[in-house]
């Protein structure tokens, strides 16, 4: 029996699990309700059950896949959807006929695929600070292809749709944050290599890249009684640590600061400091830009308590009680 073409949503977790679910879950996620999923979600978009979507990889490949092949997550009002029951998106990269999988590549994003002239360009950020907005120029008979011409030592770290008035954000491993309007990056075809995004200090790499929608920038905060507060808007989350520590073993010092406290600058310039390092700290072990409140978990899936938002954009952080594996 053929699956009917019904509205649905696709969700990709920060740990690389992907599944389809109901529009109701998407609506809750878009309204930034807590506990929509039982594990942090990286991206989510609306589609239909018989549509094609795309995976973007660290090697700059785009791989087409079918929504109908994804497991369906059941949703019960008031309970988190079990995104941990999704399939590994990584496993979907090996069945392409048009291009070969690249050794060591992994999925960095999942997007609705719309190869039309009015599609919102896809912003792509790389480890070496390159930025590109792909205009969705695409072949018609291929199931995968390259969407950015990478240098040999570079990799894609994130990709998301970006309208002209949205903001692009780079955070480097030495805690420099640079943000600028997406319209500073002209859309290009799939074979182009992009352009300089952030100027990196010697020995540093990009820790994270993100797109902040124009409507999500403004920060709202209200302090109540007994230490209670309500807050909404995009925040910058950073965790400072020791570059020589074994990955995944260090708690680190975390800081959450409203994104709109960081000034916009020109593309291809240096950033401003996003967190002050303390003694024994020389790098960011985590960096994330997203809508508040955030969800952080350990490798075992336990929630990690995060500090309250700090209005000082370059302050030092608060020591965490456990190492964070995933944040969203």
Image: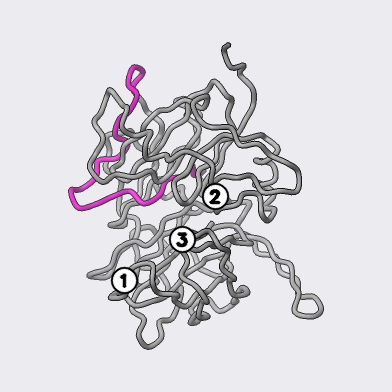
Earlier-in-chain disc, 3 versus 1:
1
**What percent of the width, then of the height, locates residue 238?**
47, 69
Q: Label 2's element?
A: strand
**What percent of the width, then of the height, locates residue 120?**
50, 36
Q: Label 1's element?
A: loop
Q: Residue at x 43, y 27 (%)?
A: 65
Q: Out of 81 and 191, give the one closest to the viewer.
A: 81
Q: Circle 2 sits on which residue?
A: 41
Tally of numbered discs: 3
Left or right of 39: which side holds 159? left
Q: What secondary structure do most residues of the magenta stretch adopt? A: loop
For the residues bearing labels 2 and 3, Cβ distance under 8 angstroms: no
**Magenta stretch?**
139-162
**What percent of the width, then of the height, locates residue 242?**
34, 77
- Pointer 3: residues within 10 angstroms few (<14), some, or many (20+)? few
**What percent of the width, then of the height, locates residue 204?**
28, 68
Earlier-in-chain disc, 1 versus 2:
2
Task: Indicate the quadrant containing the C terminus: top left, top right, bottom left or bottom right.
Answer: bottom right
Left or right of 135: which side holds 97? left
Seen in the picture, residue 48 relative to 77 is either above or below; the reply is above
Q: Label 3's element?
A: loop
Q: Is residue 16 magenta?
A: no
Q: Residue at x 30, y 30 (%)?
A: 145
Q: Circle 3 sits on which residue?
A: 299
Left or right of 222: which side holds 199? left
Q: Circle 1 sits on which residue?
A: 246
Q: Residue furthest top?
A: 1
Q: Residue at x 46, y 47 (%)?
A: 183
Q: Residue at x 48, y 78 (%)?
A: 314
Left or right of 118: which side holds 137? left
């Amino acid at each position: 029996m053929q699956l009917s073409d019904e509205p649905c949503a696709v969700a990709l977790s920060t740990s690389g699990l992907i599944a389809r679910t109901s529009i109701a879950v998407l609506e809750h996620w878009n309204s930034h309700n807590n506990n929509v999923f039982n594990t942090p979600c990286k991206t989510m978009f609306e589609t239909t059950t018989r549509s094609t979507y795309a995976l973007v990889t660290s090697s700059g490949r785009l791989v087409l896949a079918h929504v109908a092949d994804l497991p369906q997550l059941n949703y019960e009002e008031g309970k988190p959807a079990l995104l941990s029951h999704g399939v590994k998106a990584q496993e979907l990269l090996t069945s392409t006929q048009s291009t070969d999988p690249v050794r060591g590549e992994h999925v960095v994003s999942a997007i609705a695929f719309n190869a039309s002239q009015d599609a919102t360009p896809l912003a792509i950020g790389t480890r070496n600070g390159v930025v590109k907005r792909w205009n969705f120029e695409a072949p018609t008979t291929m199931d995968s292809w390259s969407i950015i011409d990478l240098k040999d030592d570079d990799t894609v770290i994130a990709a998301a749709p970006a309208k002209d008035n949205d903001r692009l954000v780079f955070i480097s491993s030495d805690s420099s944050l640079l943000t600028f309007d997406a319209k500073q990056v002209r859309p290009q075809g799939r074979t182009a290599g992009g352009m300089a995004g952030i100027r990196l200090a010697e020995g540093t790499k990009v820790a994270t890249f993100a797109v902040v929608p124009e409507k999500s920038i403004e920060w709202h905060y209200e302090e109540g009684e007994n230490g209670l507060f309500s807050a909404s808007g995009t925040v910058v989350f950073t965790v400072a640590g020791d570059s020589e520590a074994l990955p995944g073993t260090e708690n680190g010092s975390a800081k959450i600061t409203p994104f709109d406290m960081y000034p916009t600058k020109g593309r291809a310039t240096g950033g401003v400091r996003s967190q002050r390092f303390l003694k024994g700290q020389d790098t960011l072990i985590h960096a994330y830009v997203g809508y508040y409140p955030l969800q952080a978990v350990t490798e075992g899936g336990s929630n990690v308590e995060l500090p309250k938002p700090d209005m000082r954009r370059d302050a030092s952080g608060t020591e965490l009680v456990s190492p964070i594996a995933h944040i969203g």
